[in-house]
Image (tube, grey):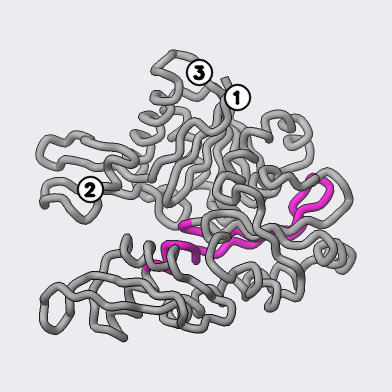
Amino acid sequence: MDIGIDLGTVNIIITMSGRGIVLNEPSCIAYNKKTAEVIAVGREAYRMEGKTPDYITVIRPLEDGVISDHNMTQTMIQYFIERVTGKQLLMPDIIMCIPSSITDVENRAVIEAAKTAGAKKVWLLEEPLAALIGAGADISRPNGNMVIDFGGGTTDIAVVSMNGIVVRQSVRVAGNKLDKAIVKFLSSRYKLLVGEKTAEAAKIAITNIFQPDGSKRFAVKGRHIVRGLPEKVEISDFDIYEAIIDTVSEIVFCAKSVLEQTPPELVADIFENGIYLTGGGALLGGLPEYLTTELHAPCVVAKDPLDCVANGAMAAFSKIESLLDGFEYISMLK
């Protein structure tokens, strides 16, 4: 049995050979400190976030794309693998997708989490490579392909040609940072305290970072910082633009840096092929147009951007021999 895992900061997506995507759940786990027991994992734990008594804590064991709580991550991965395999003793082969900036220590933590969950063999695959494969790009030819994988904890940017990553950069600025920026903006501008879930809902509903005009509106509810009472404020797409544009600019700066380091012939290919946008952030309103303007190259949202990394992980099983020969950044634990 082959299993591909997109171990994301916000969501974990699992694919299985012959079945496609079999699980897509929040990377959350709820823990009862009194009984020292895990009481919920995934979507059920996510519903509890911000709504539990003191003795129950909802943990996101991955932070900025890497494991911050090893024990909880192992428990979460094991639970999800058992769920999709029906608790069969199958010893699957697993490809785990990781950010480009991950360290050797963090690599080992990911491998140990998969081995604890019962994996026979574990491969680590960099997320931008998985995203390009999942987006349908032919990475084997001498032709430059560039991807911006805009996730929840990290944004990975890479240029790939002839089965190799030519230039790569990863910045720990992504969807979660945008949510926090919106929370901070609402607190400063409207003296309204809201949770990150509310900020995320507003971001999804009305974001337009390319020439916002204030026509899109969204009602946010929270607590007034001064009065301490419930309050509802209607915000516009221009408010969201003001809140997140500085954060988005950090990603643009990183993308420009990658292009500056890319050989001229490959830059010409990128201009022809366009830049693939994958991950949840690719769905931000106005992002393709904004990046096209800033980077002077056509930016296109890939088909099923949320699933590109997971689909690429599964497709990589058919390329393992060539990837192992040509990709130093895919490591295997035998």
Q: Residue at x 31, y 86 (%)?
A: 189
Q: Which mark is residue 123?
A: none
Q: Judging from the image, what secondary structure is the residue with disc 3 in? A: loop
Where is residue 12? Give x, y as percent.
45, 42
Q: Which mark is residue 91?
A: 3
- 124 in relation to 152, above or below: above
Residues shaded magenta? 152-179
Q: Does the magenta segment cover residue 63?
A: no
Q: Nearer the viewer, mark 3 or mark 2?
A: 2
Where is residue 203? Give x, y as percent.
43, 67
| Residue 244 located left or right of residue 253 | left
Q: Residue at x 24, y 83 (%)?
A: 191
Q: CA distance from mark 2 to mark 1?
A: 32 Å
Q: CA distance from mark 1 to mark 3?
A: 14 Å
The answer to whether the residue labelled 2 contacts the one labelled 1, judged by CB atoms less than 8 Å apart, is: no
- Label 1 amino acid? Ser
- 317 in relation to 231, above or below: above
Residue that numbered label 2 is attached to: 48
Residue that numbered label 1 is attached to: 17
Quarter of the image for residue 231 reads bottom left
